[in-house]
Image (cartoon, grey):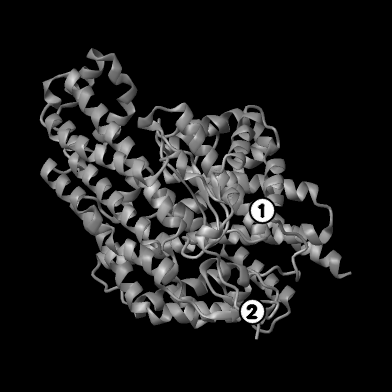
Amino acid sequence: MSETKQLPDRSSLATDVTWDLTKIFASDEVFEEKFQELSTELEKADSFKGTLAAGSTQFLAAIEFLLDVYRKVEVIYVYSHLKNDQDTANSTYQAIYARASSLLAKTSAAVSWFEPEVLTLSDEQIWAYFEEEPKLEIYRHFVKQMVDNRAHILSSEEEALLAGASEIFEASSDTFAILNNADLTFPVVKNEEGESVQLSHGVYGQLLESTDRTVREAAFKGLYGVYKQFKNTFASTLSSHVKGHNFKAKTRKYSSAREASLSNNHIPESVYDTLVTVVNNHLPLLHRYVALRKRLLAVDELHMYDLYTPVLGEAPIKFTYDQAREKALEALQPLGPEYMAVVEEAFENRWIDVVENKGKRSGAYSSGAYDTLPYILMNWHDALDQLYTLVHEMGHSVHSYFTRNNQPYVYGDYSIFLAEIASTTNENILTEHLLETEKDPRVRAYVLNHYLDGFKGTIFRQTQFAEFEHFIHTEDAKGTPLTSEFLNESYGKLNAKYYGPAVEEDEEIALEWSRIPHFYYNYYVFQYATGFSAASALADKIVENEPDALEKYLTYLKSGNSDYPIEVMKKAGVDMTQSAYIEEAMKVFEARLDELEALISELDK
């Protein structure tokens, strides 16, 4: 019998494929020192309480204290979560992460009086402070955001209660994460070589791209067989989390959890509804692509596990990590020397944690704080999609770098709504580069297929998730119990609507809701789709060297939270309050689908 392949232990990895967290804290002992220092500093919070009406000097001092403790706790939290994510089974870092999460909640509670107290002041008094104290000017937009949300801020006592309960509100999400990443045991399956491999989140994605259909089916059924065993537990965690969103929205006098979430960044709910409407209107394009995939795979029945494999057989192009690094440096050149200098630093100075190991958090992300590097987590395997993931996360990290190096701490972050635009602009530029440089018809067809798959996953699939997310929040608000049976039935119907008649309604896919971490992120996923659509417009302007396009794009990357997201994007040249940018993205999808169909016809001759 062949030996089962196992994931490596964290301790066995080469240093150069791991991130360097000593640049945050040299050791866990330093972490502990900073933890204790902040814990002591938080004891001063009450001394600022009740002073905001005393004058501009006190008003400024309170703002500076508030921002200082948040700036410090964010570094502590980031260190703990990165350490925990690199091996979620490590009890030492589970404990550190839990303590840092508690400290974050304690920090929020300690200063939760600030915003309600600001709003006890009249607009006239607040803006008079700004006239009196020049040092306050930098905080004008910061304070304006509070004033604009007067109707939804509670009393200081009520805000303290909500802030103190933050860990309780996150308990369902935390339970899901531990169960999903550390406690689930997936079966051993066979790969294309007939070797036994331990199924994991990362391996699952790889096996679904296999050209061997039996491998794909075994991975698909093996994974969902495990989720089926825990469907009621996952329904409970998701239902509880949704109830938390709805409770907080009602408490703050919002009409819905969606309004509450989007209002933080002054995003009109119409942006969300427009996305769902435009995507639903263009579902025939997705059905057409799915039907093409069925024809190319020459199968009597097309299943959900057939939607990720290359339609032209064995991939004619894939990348090792080293090759992907060089290709990324080559492809992103249109973004200019200032941008590329940061990309090179990321590769050279160990911002990236590359390979999958036992217990490592699944997926990929960019994460950091104002005073840390913008680190990247990967779970690498040699494939084209990993190159796309690398440039995607690099887009986030360079965005973070530019924001933090061009904005003061108070504006040194950016909304999720803006984040996905930076990452997917990189993806679009990579696609343009590959189609420009790859002349082999098989390679071009593969790249086109990958682009269409990526579009399917980023616009169609994430909009499907967004539609489902809003549905379950709405149903819970109406009093509908979110049981596993209800969630399965609802998700199964939605999936069938999106993928159309060419795809079999596999019973396993009705369970997909149970394994999607983004459903715990509070109206997060729609921004993948809006971001990809906006990125399509921006990438086209940059690649075509439109006058000032790159300069405007870099301005966006450096803007942080200095203005509302919709306004930042208008300055970058895209109005996201209108549907045109999504319609334009659909035209690109259709054009590339046309090109793939024509290319396939040529290859068939």
Name the residue: 59% across, 28% down.
551
Above or below, 482 against 451 in this view is below
Residue 523 occupies quadrant: bottom left
Amino acid type of the residue tagged 2 in the rendering: Val
Looking at the rendered image, the quarter that the N terminus falls into is bottom right
Residue 54 screen position, x and y as percent:
11, 21
Q: Is residue 185 toward the left or the right of residue 239 in the image?
A: right
Name the residue: 39% across, 27% down.
408
Task: Return the mark for residue 215.
Answer: 2
Residue indicated by mark 1: 321
Q: Is residue 112 toward the left or the right of residue 379 in the image?
A: left
Residue 16 screen position, x and y as percent:
60, 48
Above or below, 223 against 155 in this view is below
For mark 2, give the secondary structure.
helix
Above or below, 568 against 302 in this view is above
Amino acid type of the residue tagged 1 in the rendering: Tyr
Task: Return the mark for residue 604.
Answer: none
Q: Please name whichever residue, 565 or 65, is drawn nearer the observer in this view of the structure.
A: 65
Q: Please name whichever residue, 80 or 440, is drawn nearer the observer in this view of the structure.
A: 80
Q: Please name whichever residue, 149 or 138, is drawn nearer the observer in this view of the structure.
A: 138
Residue 169 occupies quadrant: bottom left
Q: Please name whichever residue, 228 or 342, is drawn nearer the observer in this view of the structure.
A: 342
